[in-house]
Amino acid sequence: MKTPRYQVFTIIFLLFLLSCNEPEQRIARSVGATGEILVVSQNDLQWDGQIGDSVRAFFGQDQYGLPQSEPIFKLSEIKIDKLSEMFKKHRNLFVIEINPKLSEAQVETRSDLWAKPQRVVKISAPNAESWAEAFAKNKEGFLLLYNQTERERLLNIFRPTAKADLMEEVYKTFQMKMLIPEGFYVAKQLPGFMWLRKETNDMSQGFILYQRPYRDTADFSLNKFVKVRDSLLFQYVPGPSDGSFMTTDKEFVKPKLVKTTHFVTDYATEVRGMWNVTGDFMAGPYLSYTFVNPASQQLVTAEGYIYYPNKDKRDQLRQLEALLHSIAFN
């Protein structure tokens, strides 16, 4: 007995739908503590010697702008023969290889190799000296890549809790998009100025956003930044006691300005430092970016700050850094 043609067509069509709906092979979610790099070496001599010293000195240097010593990245180490499937899922991997058969050093970087988000960096070289030279030449770029992966992970966590109403207020005021997660609220809003806060029992986090007409490159100077910042903080960001107000610390941890082409605009200035409260005993770190908004041609400063007394603050500041890097324009 022959199968009717319309039944054959129906069977083929159903098989087509089933094949289209088969789940794609999903890459594993990366693991690892915030701000951690897993270094993969071949032997103890590499980690305990010249190579390990150069890696620790760079990635383990203190993060500027914090009141206590905290490294930019925490480093853990494992031998290559112990690199199991579990360790391959680490978010940030840095692989050391000495291969005498090589004629010169080779640098490789891969994203999402065994997990997502993930950054894998590998330097192979014929000897320790050429390895160290390759590392010194490329280390700033490695740091940018690892920071990018850290921000990607944090933004993936924050996106499901985005507060659309606050984001709309930011857009209406500054003509830019910025991810604002739950817990934040508007503490002060004026034309061209917003102060957003998130308060818990033991920690305060906040954003201070403001804009002004852009005149010339002098507006990007550190002196101008501090002058404008202190003026606005005096007016709009009071402290907890009468007459107190937030200001820029200029003695304990002086503000440090760095020019960058790796923000959401082609050019911006990054400032790290400490804030304190005149008339009260409060202080903490802040991170700001100043840039020209291509949508409005206004000079915008977007800052995140933290108050977390007697606790480490690097990871919390990194959260605000990720949110600042979510800024985008139409």
Image (spheres, rainbow, N blue to C red):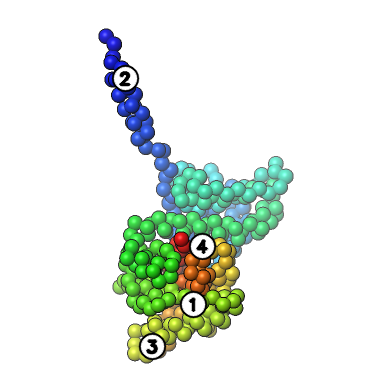
Residue holding disc 3: 244
Can the viewer see residue 132 in this picture?
no
Q: Earlier in the sequence, mark 3 or mark 1?
A: 1
Identify the secondary structure beneath mark 1: strand
Identify the secondary structure beneath mark 2: helix
Disc 3/disc 4 C-alpha distance (Å): 34 Å
Q: Nearer the viewer, mark 3 or mark 4?
A: 4
Whole-percent x and y of residue 140?
A: 60, 60
Identify the secondary structure beneath mark 3: loop
Residue holding disc 4: 264
- Checking the image for residue 212, the label placed there is 1
Disc 2/disc 4 C-alpha distance (Å): 55 Å
Residue holding disc 2: 8
Whole-percent x and y of residue 227?
A: 52, 83
160 or 106: nearer the viewer: 160
Q: Callout 4, which amino acid?
A: Val
